[in-house]
Image: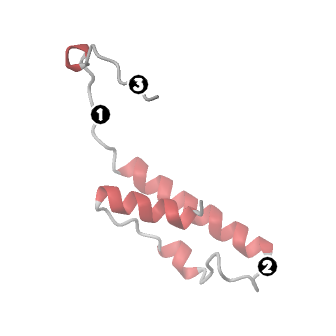
Amino acid sequence: MLMIHIKKYYEGITSQEIPTNRYSSLAISPVHIHKDKKAHKEALLVLGDEIVSHIHGHRMPVMSYSSDAASTRVAAEH
């Protein structure tokens, strides 16, 4: 999976846009095969940093688990 897919997945499930100004300023994407490996590595690290920084800044609410809500039946497939 490409890092850009992770970004789009997160945005889809949270309806929050991840700002990627630094990544966009690099003007490189996974389809730019003419760019050198170092440029792709820098872009990947920048994008990863922007995704992680956004997620850490927007903590999702913690879901509590209650054993009372658990089913006593087990589903099995054959």
Under mark 2, the amino acid is: Asp
Under mark 1, the amino acid is: Val
Indicate the position of residue 3 as horizontal and vertical percent values. 57, 62
Near-viewer residue (21 or 10): 10
CA distance separating discs 2 and 3: 50 Å
Residue at coordinates 25% horizontally, 19% vertically from top-left? 70
* Dot 3 alpha-carbon crowd within 10 angstroms: few under 14, some 14 to 19, many 20 or more: few
Outermost residue on the left side: it is: 68
CA distance separating discs 2 and 1: 42 Å
Badge nearest the viewer, 2 or 3: 3
**Residue at image mark 1:** 62
Kindly indicate the quadrant of the structure image that contains residue 18.
bottom left
Which mark identifies residue 76?
Answer: 3
State the SS at label 1: loop
State the SS at label 2: loop
Near-viewer residue (9 or 56): 9
* Dot 1 alpha-carbon crowd within 10 angstroms: few under 14, some 14 to 19, many 20 or more: few
Name above or below for residue 34 compared with residue 23: below
Judge left or right: residue 57 versus residue 42.
left
**Residue at image mark 2:** 36
State the SS at label 3: loop
Outermost residue on the front side: it is: 78
Residue at coordinates 60% horizontally, 80% vertically from top-left? 26
**Rendering colour mode:** secondary structure
